Image (cartoon, rainbow, N blue to C red):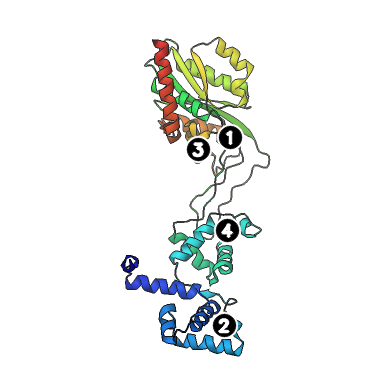
Amino acid sequence: MPGSTLIDLSCSEQEHLLFELRHARYGYWLALHILLLCAEGYSPTQIAAVLFCSRSSVYRAVNAYRAGSLAGLTDAATPHRVGSLTPSLCRSLLALLKRTPAAYGWCRTRWSCASLAAQLQVQRRVAVSAATLRRWLHQLGWVWKRAKLVARDDDPQRVNKLACTRFCIDNLARRAALVFADELDIHLLAKVGYQWMPKGETVEIVTPGVNQKSYLAAALDHLTGRVISCIGERKSAGLFLELLKGLDAAYPAAGYPRLVVVVDNFGIHKAKAVAQWLALHRRIELLFLPTYCPKANPIERVFWEVHDKCTRNHRRKKIEQLVGDVEQHLQVNGPWPYKLSAIYYTAAVTAAVKELEKQQLLKAA
């Protein structure tokens, strides 16, 4: 039915659509439409009404055709200036941002406002300044900030390992404890980060010349947020053994017949010396996280606070002083009762946990 195609457009919507049409349909392409309609016998008034152009545009196209200068109507070499971010330009801009500049032939890894403006001019023939492009990006909710490094999260046993950890936590006995453990590098060379400083000036952090390192091994109690830690000069199995001994003393066998230590797959956690020590301390067991999955370990958030409070932009000249700051932070600040990451509660992990519960019930029966 003809009436089924009728739509109600407000005046502002019609103005916007006309703006898009007249800037996307260049003089040459408009002239082709005009000539084809003229060949069909339409009058200049009818053509102007159908194509939303003026009658003078119709006469200009016909005269150019008769004079053999139709190609002169094109304005492809002259981009039109745009002052506002239209929905069409918004879609084009977002499409550019989703891909790297190299995909469009640019020899760079990140988009700048200038390169985005130049690419829009090539694709859409719109002339826009870098400052306007920056304003558009802010309007879309995009900001210029530092990226972060993430590890590959592709362990084929990822779901099963996460399910085992969650199952252990959900079914933890009253006289049992579960801790998340890991190691952290402490560098005398300061981590550089943001801080308040006068406009036009930059705070300078002097490098130590020769970098020195110490290593922190720590365990976070899942329920209380308590942190047990130790410091070593090497990140070795000996450092992890010192942490295990500290946990053995902090959670005595009389009060905790079972102690679960959740760790990643770093080699020192699977060393022969560690296995021999665990064989003599049966109540302590290791539970391994998926490989390349730091989000699964909440102690990473404790380590982030160590960097934020102690190692970022620090002015210490000796590693001993910096280590003292870290130890004081762990004693004074806290506890850190962080919740588990949302990756433990995905549908796949939840299904795997239910399967483990069924297997447990079958064994009990």
Q: Tell me whether the residue at label 3 lies in contact with that at label 4, contact meaning CB atoms closer than 8 angstroms.
A: no
Q: Nearer the viewer, residue 83 or 212?
A: 83
Q: Which x, y percent locates residue 231?
A: 56, 26
Front of the two marks 2 and 3 = 2
User: At x 52% / y 88%, what residue is drawn?
Assistant: 60
Q: Which x, y percent locates residue 287?
A: 51, 21
Q: CA distance from mark 2 to mark 3?
A: 62 Å
Relative side of 364 to 30, left or right: left
Residue that carries the numbered disc 4 in the rendered image: 111
Front of the two marks 1 and 4 = 4
Q: Nearer the viewer, residue 175 or 43?
A: 43
Front of the two marks 1 and 3 = 3
User: At x 58% / y 34%, what residue is drawn?
Assistant: 186
Q: Of helix, strand and loop, which one carries label 2?
A: helix
Q: Of helix, strand and loop, which one carries label 4?
A: loop
Q: CA distance from mark 2 to mark 4?
A: 34 Å
**Labels 2 and 1: the sequence-earlier one:** 2
Q: Which x, y percent locates residue 345?
A: 41, 32
Residue that carries the numbered disc 1 in the rendered image: 186
**Labels 2 and 4: the sequence-earlier one:** 2
The local crowd at label 3, few if under 14, some if 14 to 19, many if 20 or more residues have their Cα within 10 Å, is few
**Labels 2 and 3: the sequence-earlier one:** 2
Task: Name the image quarter holding the C terminus.
Answer: top left
**Labels 3 and 4: the sequence-earlier one:** 4
